[in-house]
């Protein structure tokens, strides 16, 4: 996936590429499962303490990316996959091969990795909220 943030100006007007990519991701990954869409807020038992200093939207996306990597490594270890010197994408592919995750979970994971790797510091809170919605609905 190429760099998504920025503005695309054409004869049809200006559009935000990253917003379109997030909206497509939500539609492709969650629309068929609308009853399973979960929106959560607040702290749950066992969660990290909320920072006193609010994180920027960019920092929040980096945190989501770190959590994605952590979750795929844990899932891989549960499935007895050697994780050393492997990327999260390689681990996702091995989990798919072992049928330890579904095709839909693999697709959503890949989409989230692509989104979190493509942002820059111009991301806004609305975009972060949409990415968080996708992340919350990832069943790894």
Image (tube, rainbow, N blue to C red):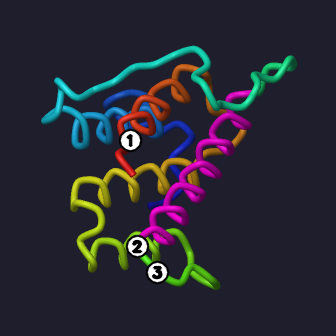
Identify the secondary structure beneath mark 2: loop
Q: Residue at image x 58%, y 55%?
A: 117
Dot 2 and dot 3 residues touching (CB under 8 Å): yes
Residue nearest the viewer, comparing 58 with 19: 58
For label 1, the residue is: 21
**Is the residue 65 above or below the residue 93 in the image?**
above
Quadrant location of the N terminus? bottom left
Residue nearest the viewer, comparing 94 with 1: 94
Numbered label attached to residue 81: 3
Q: Which residues are magenta?
A: 56-78
Q: Position of residue 102 (x, y in %)?
A: 23, 60
How far, Cα to Cα, is label 2 from label 3?
6 Å
- Quarter of the figure with residue 60: top right
User: Is 34 left, or right, of 135 in this rendering?
Assistant: left
For label 2, the residue is: 79
- Quarter of the figure with residue 133: top left
Residue nearest the viewer, comparing 12 with 49: 49
Residue 128 belongs to the span the image colors magenta? no
Q: Residues within 10 Å of mark 1 (few under 14, many from 20)?
A: some
Q: Residues within 10 Å of mark 2 (few under 14, many from 20)?
A: some
- Quarter of the figure with residue 136: top left
Q: Position of residue 41 (x, y in %)?
A: 52, 16
């Amino acid at each position: 996936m190429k760099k998504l943030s920025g503005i695309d100006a054409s004869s049809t007007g200006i559009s935000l590429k990253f917003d379109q990519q997030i909206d497509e991701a939500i539609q492709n990954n969650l629309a068929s499962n609308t009853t399973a869409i979960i929106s959560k807020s607040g702290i749950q038992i066992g969660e990290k303490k909320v920072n006193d200093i609010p994180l920027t939207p960019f920092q929040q996306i980096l945190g989501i990316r770190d959590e994605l990597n952590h979750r795929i490594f844990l899932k891989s270890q549960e499935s007895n996959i050697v994780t050393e010197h492997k990327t999260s994408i390689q681990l996702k592919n091995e989990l798919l091969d072992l049928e330890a995750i579904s095709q839909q979970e693999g697709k959503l994971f890949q989409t989230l990795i692509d989104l979190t790797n493509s942002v820059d510091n111009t991301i806004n809170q609305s975009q972060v909220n949409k990415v968080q919605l996708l992340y919350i609905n990832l069943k790894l």
